[in-house]
Amino acid sequence: MGVLITAGAIAYGQCEEIYLKGRVQDTAMPQSFYNLMVINVTTQQGVFGRPNGEFAVYVRPGDRIAFSVKGYSKKFIDIPQQQVCTIDTVITLSPNIQNIEEVTVYPIKSLEQIKEEREALSQRETRTVTGINVLESPITALYERFSQSAQSKRLVAQMEHQDNMDKVVRELLRAYVSYDVVYLEEEQFTAFINFLNIDEHFLRTASDYELIVYIQGKLEHYKQLHPELFMR
């Protein structure tokens, strides 16, 4: 990979901070990258690129930078020591081509769609359900069948609210797995979501980056507690 040095030279000494900018492109054809993530592997921090593939981030000499796009092989570069404090580069990504076993395909929502769902989370009063809605809300139907007390209704509302939170977290995990941010099988989601026990306020208000860092950290802890689940 060629790196083009543009401007910003310091007359003496090495740069302590470098402005890394550029764009990613497909090896075969022009392509937009709506889910480009630029991850500083050294500092465990990351940003999202622009839909046209352009990106810009501050890094330090010695940092290892990863470029991740769903459906493409991840690309890494190492930031060298240098006297010029700007790097302008083109990152070429190759589509993943592999033979895989038949799997169940789940629709992957965009991070913006999931963010809207996170912000919309709120607990509500439970209504009596009948007919077709019984199939859509089995928890509500079960509890309201045996009790109409306010206490039971509150319990139903809490359980439904927790179920809604779990669904949002599940969508987040699917998105992060598809972007190569975390490595987790679909059948492991339920146990890991229970382990996360994520706070509702944090789920609603955290930035995408804060959620990624939090979930990555909890997943490492989960792997340490259950290494047998990740042995291949």
Image (cartoon, rainbow, N blue to C red):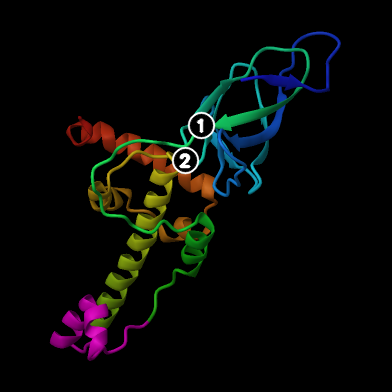
Contact between labelled residues 1 and 2, with CB atoms less than 8 Å apart: yes
Q: Which mark is residue 44?
A: 1
Amino acid carrying mark 2 in the image: Val
Kindly state the secondary structure of the residue where label 1 is placed. loop
Is residue 191 or residue 199 the one in the foreground? Answer: 191
Q: Residue at x 50, y 33 (%)?
A: 94
Q: Which mark is residue 8?
A: none
Describe residue 13's horizontal placement relative to residue 95 as left or right. right
Q: Residue at x 35, y 67 (%)?
A: 164
CA separation in Å, label 2 and label 1: 8 Å
Dot 2 surroundings within 10 Å: few (below 14), some, or many (20 or more)?
some
Q: Which mark is residue 213?
A: 2
Magenta region, residue range: 125-150
Is 44 located above or below residue 157 in the figure?
A: above
Q: Is residue 146 magenta?
A: yes
Q: Residue at x 62, y 36 (%)?
A: 24
Amino acid carrying mark 1 in the image: Gln
Residue 140 on image: x %, y %: 24, 80
Residue 31 on image: x %, y %: 60, 44
Is 117 located above or below residue 26 in the figure?
A: below
Residue lying at the far left in this picture: please name it.
146
Quarter occupied by the C terminus: top left
Residue 128 on image: x %, y %: 27, 90
Mark closer to the chain start, 2 or 1: 1
Residue 112 on image: x %, y %: 54, 59
Kindly state the secondary structure of the residue where label 2 is placed. helix
Residue lying at the far top in this picture: please name it.
12
